[in-house]
Amino acid sequence: MSVIKKRFELLKNTALYLRGTTAKERVEKLNRIWDGIVERKDDLYHAGMIERGVQPVDIAGELIMVKAEIDYTSKHLDKWIKPKRVKNTMFTLGKRCEIRHQSKGVVLNMPAYNAPTAETFVPMISAMAAGNAVIIKPSEHAAKSAKILEEIIHKALPENEAYVIQGGVEVAQELLSLPFNHIYYTGGNAVGKIVMKAAADNFSSITLEMGGKSPVIVDETANLENAAKKVAWGRVMNAGQVCVAPEYVIAHESISERFSLLIKEQMELLYNSENTGFNESKYVPRIINGRHTKRIKSLIDDAVKKGAQTVLGGGADLQDRFIEPTILKNMNEKMDIMNEEVFGPVISLLTYKDQSEVIEIIEKRANPLALYIYSNNKDNISFFLDNTSSGSAVINNNCIQAGGNPNLPFGGVGSSGMGRSGGHRGFVEMSNERSVVHQPLDKFRDFMLQFPPYSDKYVNMITKAIK
Ligand code: NAD
């Protein structure tokens, strides 16, 4: 038996014990994780700096998401794990109907590289809260963070309850061949398909947290200065390696030229205020590796070759994993960037005249993870919300919906994902929602009517229900 299979079996053997643990015991373990995170926070800051050139405050933002999730879960878990009585209908009259949230068993969590701490712990908190054992396979592209996360987890929890297995694609594929009860995957949708197919072999349930091209609609009534600052920030933060980052803007033709210049102005104010170049700013992070830097630069070059104009940027330093914050306009559908997720600090600008064009542009692409609307007109906002689909939407801001409020379930739709994470919804995702009906055996409640030969009373009762 391979080492990975042995680990899986070990966790499987603990799953039944974990199912029987109390809310108090589970919360105590979540708090041990938090203590471990706090103890190693400087190491996590350092790893983030080396891997993506981000500031300690950026990693602290990730840690706050984890803390919010632990606090919220700790506060409510006692209530969540109690059987929940539900109302009766005519057909369940006299019976006691309830829903019990039972652990699924062993959960596999495979995070991506762009926010390794939050993507490791947020799903893990829900999985543990629901009483599951968890295996984590961190992203090999953020190996320094992955090592620290492994040390935190192995110090806080017994190895037969939560275990970290490091490795790349081969390790991921071996793990995916095992009969996990639930697989939680964060990453691109090409691998999402592989995960979904592998899950089918074992009928594992899945949560897929993927990406796509999240649009920003800016109408003629928007507060343009305000919108430009937020879009500039949303696109350059973490060097654009944010699943909900705005990928392209569709601006009304009456304001599009002005808006493009305002984003440019804001990118320069926020990330090149001393005019020494974006590469000198400590607030412009780096791309995770050379391969992705090259991929993003090729998307820019392909767009320019096919007629795009650069309002800003366009440059890169492959050696330094640096992509200049870039604004492109004059886009067309032949450009690869119009269909591929950039996951880098590059924004494309499109214009519209009629609202219907906006819907057409969005519908042409795969389902977005997020959609942003900048507008001061209620009717326009309703029209754009009602006629589009996305995992989440924000009006007059961007990126603020992810991770900050456990009352808001997070996830995608279609090619940007399935299932939800965070808060109660995350707990339910990792649970088997089991319906349990108790039949009392006294003659007033145990009617015994449905058995043949059917009585007239029973036939009348059923046929009358069909009107
Ligand atoms: P990645 O390369 O780190 O891969 C993610 C995971 O998949 C890793 O554990 C990796 O080892 C595994 N993997 C890679 N290739 C595999 C294969 N052939 N078979 C099996 N497993 C494999 O990350 P990525 O996919 O480049 O991540 C970036 C993407 O993640 C973007 O599309 C982004 O939008 C998305 N994302 C989504 C969310 C969300 O919550 N919806 C959050 C962050 C990132």
Image: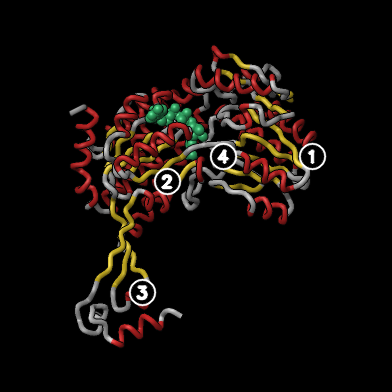
Task: Identify the residue at image location x=67%, y=55%.
Answer: 382
Q: Earlier in the sequence, mark 2 or mark 1?
A: 2
Residue 344 quadrant: top right
The label on residue 88 is 3
What's under tag 3, amino acid-wise?
Asn
Vertical relation: 219 (above or below) 139:
below
* Residue density around tag 2, few if under 14, some if 14–19, many if 20 or more, within 10 Å: many
Q: Choose the circle earlier in sequence order: 3 or 1.
A: 3
The verdict on label 1 being within 8 Å of ligand 1 is no
How far from the left and from the top, in percent, is residue 293?
Answer: 55, 19
- As shown in the figure, which amino acid type bears the numbered disc 1? Glu
Distance from disc 3 to disc 1, alpha carbons, whole Å, reads 56 Å
Residue 323 in the image: state x and y as whole percent: 60, 20
Counting from the top left corner in percent of width and height, residue 82 is at 31, 61
Please name the residue that numbered disc 4 is placed on.
366
Marks 1/4 in contact by CB < 8 Å: the verdict is no
In the image, residue 72 sits, relative to residue 55, either above or below, namely below
What residue sits right under mark 2 in the picture?
69
| Mark closer to the observer (4, 3) | 4
In the displayed structure image, the side of residue 150 where residue 11 appears, left or right: left
The answer to which of marks 2 and 3 sits earlier in the sequence is 2
Q: Nearer the viewer, residue 176 or 424?
A: 176
- Per the image, label 4 sits on a secondary structure element best described as loop
Of 245 and 118, nearer the camera is 245
Residue beneath the point at 72% across and 52% down:
380
Residue furthest top in the image: 319
Label disc, if present, on residue 253 of the rendered structure: 1
Q: Quadrant of ligand 1?
A: top left
Measured Cα–Cα span from mark 4 to mark 2? 30 Å
Dot 1: few (<14), some (14–19), or many (≥20) neighbours within 10 Å? some
